[in-house]
Amino acid sequence: MSVAVDRDQAFVETIGRIADGVAAVNADAVDHDARFPAESIQALREAKALSALIPVELGGGGVAFETIAAACLQLGRRCGASAMVFAMHQIQVASIVRHLDDASWFEDYLRELATDQRLIASVTSEVGTGGDMGRSVAALTPGPNGLSSFEKQAPTVSYGQYADDLLVTLRRAPDSEPGDQVVVLAHKDQFTLEPTGTWDPLGMRGTCSPGYVVRAEVASEQALPTPFPRVSSESMVPVSHILWSHLWLGIATDAFDRARAFVRAAAKQKPGEQLPTAIRLSHLMSELSLLRAEVESALREFTDASAEPGRERLSTMASALRFNNLKIAASEQAPRVCQSALGICGIMGFKNDTPFSVGRHLRDTMSACLMVANERIHQTNASLLLIAKDV
Amino acid sequence: MSVAVDRDQAFVETIGRIADGVAAVNADAVDHDARFPAESIQALREAKALSALIPVELGGGGVAFETIAAACLQLGRRCGASAMVFAMHQIQVASIVRHLDDASWFEDYLRELATDQRLIASVTSEVGTGGDMGRSVAALTPGPNGLSSFEKQAPTVSYGQYADDLLVTLRRAPDSEPGDQVVVLAHKDQFTLEPTGTWDPLGMRGTCSPGYVVRAEVASEQALPTPFPRVSSESMVPVSHILWSHLWLGIATDAFDRARAFVRAAAKQKPGEQLPTAIRLSHLMSELSLLRAEVESALREFTDASAEPGRERLSTMASALRFNNLKIAASEQAPRVCQSALGICGIMGFKNDTPFSVGRHLRDTMSACLMVANERIHQTNASLLLIAKDV
Amino acid sequence: MEQIHMGNQLLGGLMNELLSGMTAPAESTGPVESTAWKIGVETAGPASDDVDRGSRFPRETVEEFKRTGLLAALVPEHLGGGGASLAEVAGAVRAISFHCVSSALVLAMHSIEVSNLVRHGASEPLQALLAEIASGQLLIANANSEVGIGGDVGRSICAVESTDEGLRLEKEALAISYGEYADLIVATARQTPDSEQTDQVQVICRRGAFTLEQTSSWDATGLRGTCSNGFRLAASLKADMIYPVPFAVVANNGGIQATTILLSAAWVGLAEAAAAKAHSYVRAAARRSIGTVPPAAGQLAVLATDLEQARGLLAATASTFVMLETSPEMESPNFIASTRNLKVSTSELAVRIATAALTICGIMGYKRDAPYSLDRQIRDAHGALVMVSNERYLRANAVMLLARKHL
Amino acid sequence: MEQIHMGNQLLGGLMNELLSGMTAPAESTGPVESTAWKIGVETAGPASDDVDRGSRFPRETVEEFKRTGLLAALVPEHLGGGGASLAEVAGAVRAISFHCVSSALVLAMHSIEVSNLVRHGASEPLQALLAEIASGQLLIANANSEVGIGGDVGRSICAVESTDEGLRLEKEALAISYGEYADLIVATARQTPDSEQTDQVQVICRRGAFTLEQTSSWDATGLRGTCSNGFRLAASLKADMIYPVPFAVVANNGGIQATTILLSAAWVGLAEAAAAKAHSYVRAAARRSIGTVPPAAGQLAVLATDLEQARGLLAATASTFVMLETSPEMESPNFIASTRNLKVSTSELAVRIATAALTICGIMGYKRDAPYSLDRQIRDAHGALVMVSNERYLRANAVMLLARKHL
């Protein structure tokens, strides 16, 4: 236990160093040019952070999930885009690791990921599904050569161009229902990406998430044995919401820190005066406190439920509601915090080149409501609330 | 451990039964007449709930603090006033139990409390201190008979008329500084209350909290050995904020439950239709989720810090900020939840006599911002934020 | 309950300050409003606590409405009325509401019906009825809501029926505010028992020719004096007491607009009362520490921006109504949407203002029996949100927006 | 990044819809606004992205302002100007802002100075200057802010100094928006080196007689085209180019009021642009599933209530300004407080509207290069909050409220 704790602590410290030393330094350029945070990801690779969540016996770092969440928060404090790339990669890793079921192809793949520090991108959303991840149009189609192929119209693939591998949701076969989905891992040398859009957004600019037509040919064992609905409810959805929330909290925390630095600097200039902005900072802190508690408490519920045999609690309606609430609440609260920070820092926060700039923070967190649109989640929740017993 | 868990679980179940069977039944009358929730307190006495937090070796129930918090939540779901009386009593008990320092007078007193199920009220606020609990005007004044006397102008003493004993903050002696305070336990037969005001408020009407001039004569060992500033920061303030927040959460949870019942009833009348109120219910749930996480996370931080030797963490500025934030955030979020519930239930929620009435919930939770005014707390926080290292 | 204390010795002084501060808002719309303000100060205000606690009809105030002719303010002068504009009556509603929201709502709901009659009652019998309203100061209530239609007054289940004894109407009204005290009750119904639910007329039932059987009671968080009990209405009708135009015309051509404007006037008056208490509280605090700006003054400044918005919206919409009185633009979807917005915005602003006032006054606002008590304003303001539900208005507007070319 | 997809095949159609939907808001204040709208459509709009990305001066748009005489719209006709009212110019600012907020702010900030000159420049040299502004379409910038006074323009550190070569001013201006492109720069200063900080005059510096040394750069979240760099201003002054009344008079008697009204006009135009995009988006969604009301329509209805408030406030305050043009009431604390409220409310409503529009349009609003992009509106709207800080206005109002008898 103590070894594990030390290892995890060392990992968080490493990430903290990368956040401060690399991510922070390049954050403005990444944002300005809407470019991939290559330096951060390179540093994370060198620190073997991309395989941190993979068990030691498969060559990974074996750190706890909570530690990955803490790492997302650390990175989020310095560069939202770096944190988002890291988080999305870890979501894919977690989905594989938690649903391995002794599938030897995937065990080998994880070993390879650890050795080569491969970066996985996600291809879950699809044109024509109305944003419902629980349905697919594209299907895994058996070919003459024993391999299966697919072609998927993805409206966004974050850092697709920079990914080594893709984790893709598909219908199991050409004659399957839209909801009969599998998750397939397509290897760099097996897929092609044909861009169908551009990426020049308000914030989270470094995630480089245009649309693509994804085409690939894969072997049948590259489909995860566990059906996607279970991967989704037990892992992909809660893990996404938790890791995203952590990085949004990280961004919001930095906005708070900058507002606090601003107020302290102002107080130094006027010692003894009661500053109106100091009161506003207290208001801001209580908003941040709500966000922090929400994120922490959801993480704990997830790790508790994950530790139970069968992880059955994660498949309940109450659990779906819980982690949907996390997404909604955190995605609304994070930009609120950043907006209040801007209110405190004023023009110094509005300018891009001061120590108190919080414009990027605000722009980045405003994406949170759109990553799986909150209104769609509310619709799902509304249905669940009508039938769920306990909530 | 298992015995303790069973005992605590049994206690929560008992409280749940009292909440449903007694508190709920009388809640409307208590509210309407602004009268003391005598039935609830009687039932709590019979269940020995008033001494639940007292260690077994002193004749108490020995339940954990978390269990008391859970009980406040349960009671809050059925009758805000009953929950508030219970919570305020437990705040006094916790302040004594956590700072006993082997004082034999107080050990005896706790045994007596357990036997007779005595109810303690709090006399901390005072005319002329500008709402600052950290200062007193009234002083413990030595008399000729070896006893000490005091006279305190208290702007509010909740359920003072129904209390067996009073816990009072005072200056240590007539020549002490305002901040040199002690806590004194005055016994029923030692004090008199002269009413100075009335109690006919918007909500929390059953707490019966008019102002009084409190006069008493007590022995010197009736002052708690630990100085009040330490009692305050380690126990009274965080415990108050935690137990209050739990009962506000309880009230808000019931408002949510009523809104959900309303939506489900409406859905039954129009099966298959997408109800706009169902979406609003999902919004409401995410608001409740924020409140719940905030309350749970603060409780955990408190119990963790309380378990550490010396409880030093509770005396840090970061800790003061943490539990002040809890108070602010919870007191703002709870009425927000009730207001949204009213928006969903509409006229049925506005009426006092439907299963979906939430008017009392709203009125009760609107007191939360005023129990130690949030603006005052923000002023304290603002000062702390300027000097605290970590927040 | 902990609180920031305010010494009792200060209360006397504050009470004086408060009363002196509670004068009519600076911009009065004229004599109708002045009359109303006087009734507010002398009758509605003093009775308001008793009306609220007893959830009883504000009869003394309505007596004053009658005595001063306020109930016929909208009736044209040649029919014996006051010939006032809707904007002027909105001013009166707002002035009454400063002192007692329930009383103001009685005046508002009554005046909506008078406005409709003036706009659509061109027939001789209805003109005669208007003259009678003026001479007899008749009070009109509304029974448009109905059990089973879920609050959508654009549909009716009940119908006007021809019987051997003439026309009859039986209706399960969800609520008829102050129905027991009304001389006339208007109600929507299907035109005939064979008509569609949306093929509605509005009929006028006269005291003596209707009976009311109470089906639900009104014990609510606020707006308690409106006595909005549910009733089973049974009435004998005269054919000439049915509006000569379909109900849809009554509603779209002035009805919805007058409703939203007069209700909003009540919410603005409520907000002004809450704001006045907060203002007095802050000024008293400032006087206690001359030369400093109390922290609550900043909150008051925010409150004032909300109040300004509420007042501005009301004034603008009321004067547009007056301008469009005879214009086909009255029925334009844009203006209807705009009046719905008025009600949604003013009711939300009223809640915000009352809540902010409570934050400012603290425990002195939370207590019912303190001079700064905001108890009724808080409770009544929440009624503003649910009385003709904002949700319903927003949904109606949503549909309209889809058809609109420009926002 | 996950998103709700919208097929690319739809984009062409949507773009057409969007452009057709983007016509001038229905109620135009007249020809000045129409001129501005045309400039918006033809010049400011097309240039807006480049202006934003390059954080550059919208020179092509300002050229059009000059060509069409907009820069002298407020100058009386007998001096060669347009003789327009402030309300009309507010309409123009709002129309430009629909297409490019930075351009609108240039027009607004310039017009504030013209308004002040018209109100207080009765002296012959200043009348001549006004005529020259009209004939030469001179652009005026403002250098009232100063390093070291913390944003309180009611105080100055710099002073007008008498030297052997005449009057001189040196000032560390916190920011002079588009200072490098201005023909005239007005600046506050202490009257003499011995004066109190509050004993201020406002002086007019002419191109050729001033130098600007850049001390800070303007790379901001939004409002990027205003080029609000910091400068060290050094100028030779002519005595007759100093306002003949103290700065406090300039500010209180029309200055603050014109500032808040014209800035608010920019925020309202911004909000209208965001609302128009959301509206088009919802209409397009409704067309894809005829007969249903898209969920976003409800959000649009809420947004519309906010927009109505912002528009109503602006219209009411602008017309009050025009009404009080020659009245001593212009200086009344109530009207000044009311105009501050206008700025606070419209800027907050603009943020709310832009944010709500983003929720409605989703990822299509988040992208810069999508037809429904709200990128600039979101960024600019947040600038509305900090540009002349709402906090400062609210604090000023708080002090004023203490003295006021009625709210």
Image (spheres, coloured by chain):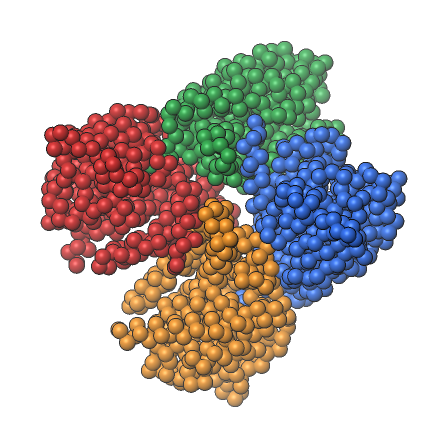
Chain colours: A red, B orange, C blue, D green
Q: Quadrant of residue C52?
A: bottom right
Q: Quadrant of residue C82?
A: top right
**Can residue D264 be seen by looking at this rendering?**
yes
Name, please, the residue furthest toward the front: C164
Quarter of the image containing the C terminus of chain C? top right
**Can residue D256 be seen by looking at this rendering?**
no
- Measuring from the top left, give residue D395's x and y in whole percent: 58, 43
Instruction: Report the front residue among C120 and B36.
Output: C120
- Measuring from the top left, give residue B114's x and y in whole percent: 41, 82
Image side of residue A163 versus residue D284, left or right:
left
State whether residue D286 is above or below residue D213: below
Image side of residue D330 versus residue B344, left or right:
right
Instruction: Report the front residue among A178 and A43.
Output: A178
- Measuring from the top left, give residue C31's x and y in whole percent: 83, 44
Instruction: Report the front residue among B167 and B118.
Output: B118
At 35% across and 36% down in the image, what residue appears? A129
Name, please, the residue furthest toward the bottom: B145
Quarter of the image containing the N terminus of chain C? bottom right
At 26% across and 73% down in the image, what residue appears? B1
Image side of residue A90 versus residue B233, left or right:
left
- Measuring from the top left, give residue D230's x and y in whole percent: 47, 27
